[in-house]
């Protein structure tokens, strides 16, 4: 992009800023030209250029280097708009580096200062990063709230593309999308028409992930082929790695192991030492399955170790993000209460100074008595409330696993089935039982057996939706009511769960405890909405799965050997993508 000779420095910088994501190659060239003429820029314009440098370094995936630049802008630019934009980008940067505690502390304070941000662009960027951070922390409802604010506050001269992308990301975080969702397809069209390839690619990668999970592999490969040239042109690091992993996954499902291996190795070679990334997790899994199918067990074991490390790191990061968000929020609330408390104390002291000595003593006495009374009331209210919550939890949940116990599961399932029947929805009841669980207890002890049960529950929860009902029916037997799930969708979810058990052994120190499960499924489409017949049908299917050799799913009413359904395993969401 040529720089016009009679433009001021700020005009040049704003023109360069406007093409960051729409024409990244020209943006990089324009940055270089601005640096050659940096001596002519004012002090404010030099800081603006410094911020754009930080944005580009972060875009290229050099996060530690970008962090230093962004902190420099925040501390020394003395420009409120630049400080806000740099703070928003630093939140994303710290998250990409795994510094979640600092990242969410920054996000919590930024959310509090949002009403004071007046610059439209700075406010828009801050909303975008808050939406992404909250979705990333497992709070998609809050992420959607900030995305909707973005849609209503698009700065003049800008398109709604980025706001719609954040909205799609929040909906994806809540598992509300499929490959035909209008929000998904409309956002791709709007961002493409607006000349925003980075954002269009972000949503296109989500679409590919939905196509793969739905088993539409030829459509997914066609989408990858269409997307690859634009990703290579933008050179946005997370997208380059993600598209390579998606290509590997699809080739593997299509049986082309040679091309699948090449694409997976391409993704692996792009990773940095110590990276924990969803794309790396998917690539290592493909390599492990390829080597296993060839009988190369040494190489398969090596790739499997990498896959397990990435998988556990990914799950650990998800937990750490959630904990970091909650800790940051609680810490901020505590500080706010302390500040408000100090302010109130100061006002009381100023009032006391205006009173004579006797009035002061009387006031202090009354205040002390009131505080003691209030503290006593608050103390007992807190104790009563905690006891109520504890008793309520104990009355509904299993003490070991934390999910519904048998009686409460049956009550909730009965209520959900009645609701489904009224609106003519469909549901599936899945019963599953851990195979040879007695051998685990006999071999490793009951403590390890309990750990296996908790591990199986954690895996199951990661595959369920918010509306699904999950309970422990007794021992190693569990039940799931999949709400608003036709039979075919229930089969997909149940088979994905079975496959996840098979490839996710419990690892405690140097001990690896593999396990599997047999599953039986009964659908309201065939049985109806009465819970008792559904239970008998799913139990019958479960026992049929055990008699047929275990580690399989059997659907009640199917004929022949149900075996293990040839459905794709879930690989999770695409890697998180940076936000402007």
Image (cartoon, rainbow, N blue to C red):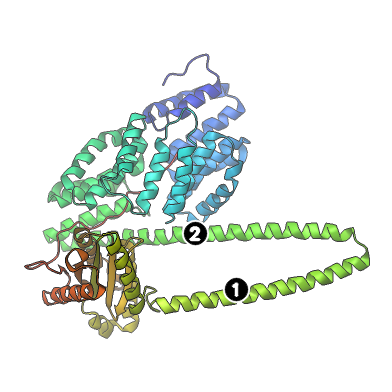
Residue 60 in picture, x, y percent from top left: 40, 39
Q: In this rendering, is residue 246 above or below 494?
A: above
Q: Does residue 35 show up?
A: no
Q: Quadrant of the N terminus?
A: top left
**Left or right of 489 in this view: 57:** right
Residue 334 in picture, x, y percent from top left: 62, 61
Judged from the image, the secondary structure of the residue bearing numbered disc 1 is helix
Say the numbered circle drawn on residue 324. Answer: 2
Q: In this rendering, is residue 276 above or below 415?
A: above
Asked if marks 1 and 2 touch (Cβ < 8 Å), the reply is no
Judged from the image, the secondary structure of the residue bearing numbered disc 2 is helix
The residue at which mark 1 appears reads as 382
Q: Give the camera-side residue of 256 and 531.
A: 531
Q: Residue furthest front?
A: 422
Q: Give the camera-side residue of 161 and 539.
A: 539
**Left or right of 216 in this view: 395:** right
Residue 535 in picture, x, y percent from top left: 23, 75
Residue 119 in picture, x, y percent from top left: 57, 34
The CA span between labels 1 and 2 is 25 Å
Sequence-earlier tag: 1 or 2 = 2
For the point 48% across and 16% down, which residue is it?
4
Q: Quadrant of the C terminus?
A: top left
Q: Residue furthest top?
A: 6
For the point 42% across and 32% down, which residue is it?
159
In front: label 1 or label 2: 1
């Amino acid at each position: 992009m040529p720089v016009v000779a009679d433009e001021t420095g700020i005009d040049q910088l704003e023109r360069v800023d406007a093409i960051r994501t729409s024409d990244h190659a020209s943006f990089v060239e324009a940055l270089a030209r601005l640096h050659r003429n940096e001596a002519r820029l004012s002090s404010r314009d030099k800081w603006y250029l410094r911020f754009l440098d930080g944005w580009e370094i972060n875009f290229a995936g050099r996060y530690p280097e970008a962090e230093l630049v962004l902190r420099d802008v925040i501390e020394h630019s003395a420009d409120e708009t630049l400080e806000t934009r740099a703070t928003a980008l630093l939140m994303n940067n710290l998250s990409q580096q795994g510094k979640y505690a600092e990242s969410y502390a920054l996000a919590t304070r930024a959310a509090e200062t949002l009403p004071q941000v007046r610059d439209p662009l700075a406010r828009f960027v801050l909303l975008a990063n808050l939406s992404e951070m909250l979705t990333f922390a497992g709070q998609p409802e809050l992420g959607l709230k900030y995305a909707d604010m973005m849609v209503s506050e698009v700065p003049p001269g800008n398109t709604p593309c980025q706001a719609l992308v954040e909205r799609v990301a929040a909906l994806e975080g809540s598992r509300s999308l499929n490959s035909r969702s209008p929000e998904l397809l409309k956002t791709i069209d709007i961002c493409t028409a607006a000349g925003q390839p980075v954002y269009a690619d972000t949503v296109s990668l989500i679409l590919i992930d939905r196509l793969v999970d739905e088993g539409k592999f030829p459509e997914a490969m066609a989408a990858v082929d269409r997307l690859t040239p634009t990703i290579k042109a933008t050179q946005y690091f997370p997208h380059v790695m993600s598209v390579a992993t998606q290509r590997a996954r699809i080739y593997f499902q299509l049986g082309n192991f040679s091309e699948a291996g090449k694409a997976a190795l391409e993704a692996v070679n792009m990773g940095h030492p110590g990276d924990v990334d969803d794309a790396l997790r998917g690539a290592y899994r493909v390599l492990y399955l390829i080597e296993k199918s060839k009988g190369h067990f040494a190489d398969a074991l090596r790739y499997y170790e990498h896959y397990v490390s990435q998988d556990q790191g990914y799950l650990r990061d998800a937990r750490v993000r959630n904990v970091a968000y909650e800790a940051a929020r609680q810490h901020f609330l505590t500080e706010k209460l302390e500040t408000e408390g100090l302010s109130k104390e100061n006002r009381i002291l100023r009032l006391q100074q205006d009173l004579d000595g006797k009035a002061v003593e009387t006031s202090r006495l009354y205040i002390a008595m009131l505080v003691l009374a209030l503290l006593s009331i608050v103390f007992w209210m807190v104790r009563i409330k905690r006891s109520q919550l504890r008793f309520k939890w104990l009355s509904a949940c299993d003490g070991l696993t934390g999910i519904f116990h048998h009686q409460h599961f049956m009550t909730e399932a009965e209520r959900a089935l009645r609701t489904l029947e009224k609106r003519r929805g469909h549901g599936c009841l899945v019963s599953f039982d851990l195979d040879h669980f007695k051998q685990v207890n006999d071999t490793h002890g009951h403590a390890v057996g309990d750990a296996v049960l908790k591990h199986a529950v954690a895996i199951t929860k990661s595959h369920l939706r918010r509306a699904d009902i999950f309970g422990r029916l007794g021992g190693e037997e569990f039940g799931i009511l999949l709400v608003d799930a036709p039979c075919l969708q229930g089969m997909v979810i149940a088979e994905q769960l079975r496959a996840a058990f098979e490839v996710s052994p419990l690892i405690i120190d140097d001990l690896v405890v593999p396990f599997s499960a047999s599953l039986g499924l009964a659908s309201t489409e065939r049985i109806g909405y009465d819970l008792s017949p559904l239970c008998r049908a799913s139990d019958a299917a479960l026992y049929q799965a055990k008699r047929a050799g275990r580690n399989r799913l059997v659907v009640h009413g199917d004929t022949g050997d149900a075996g293990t359904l040839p459905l794709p395993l879930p690989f999770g969401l695409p890697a998180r993508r940076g936000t402007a």
